[in-house]
Image (cartoon, rainbow, N blue to C red):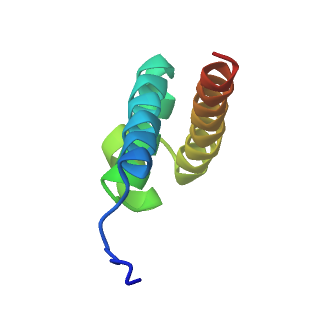
Amino acid sequence: AETLESDAVSPEAEALVRERSRRIELGLGEMKKDFRIAVILRDIEGLSYEEIAYVTEVSVGTVKSRIARGREMLREIVQSGERESVQL
């Protein structure tokens, strides 16, 4: 018997990606503004630390700190949401 192979993503995988994206968006919304801006500018917009420092008018060290702390906050929020959905 032949099996058909496909490069298409399974509906389950698509649903998981959508759910994770939704959690990330919600998590970004829950973060303090300074951390949210730094994470978005770096991880979504692709700006350098120096560019972010210029735009936000803070030092590069502050930018790096905000990005690290913001990523950790986001990670905790997303993982918390994933644990809650597993318990349902």
Q: Quadrant of residue 86?
A: top right
Point out residue 62 in the picture as x, y percentages from the top left corner: 58, 43
Residue 47 against residue 39 in the figure, above or below? below
Question: In the image, 30: left or right of 54?
Answer: right
Residue 69 against residue 88 in the figure, above or below? below
User: Which one is in front, 11 or 47?
Assistant: 11
Residue at image position (62%, 38%) is 75
Question: In the image, 59: left or right of 18?
Answer: right
| Number of numbered discs visible in the structure rendering | 0
Point out residue 30 in the picture as x, y percentages from the top left corner: 48, 18
Asked whether the viewer can see residue 57, the reply is no
User: Which one is in front, 2 or 12?
Assistant: 2
Point out residue 64 in the picture as x, y percentages from the top left corner: 58, 50
What quarter of the picture does the N terminus occupy? bottom left
Residue at image position (41%, 21%) is 29
Residue 44 against residue 81 in the figure, above or below? below
Q: Quadrant of residue 70?
A: top right
Point out residue 7 in the picture as x, y percentages from the top left corner: 32, 74
Asked whether the viewer can see residue 62, the reply is yes
What quarter of the picture does the C terminus occupy? top right
Residue at image position (43%, 34%) is 19
**Residue extending farthest front:** 1
Residue 87 against residue 76 in the figure, above or below? above
User: Which one is in front, 47 or 80?
Assistant: 80
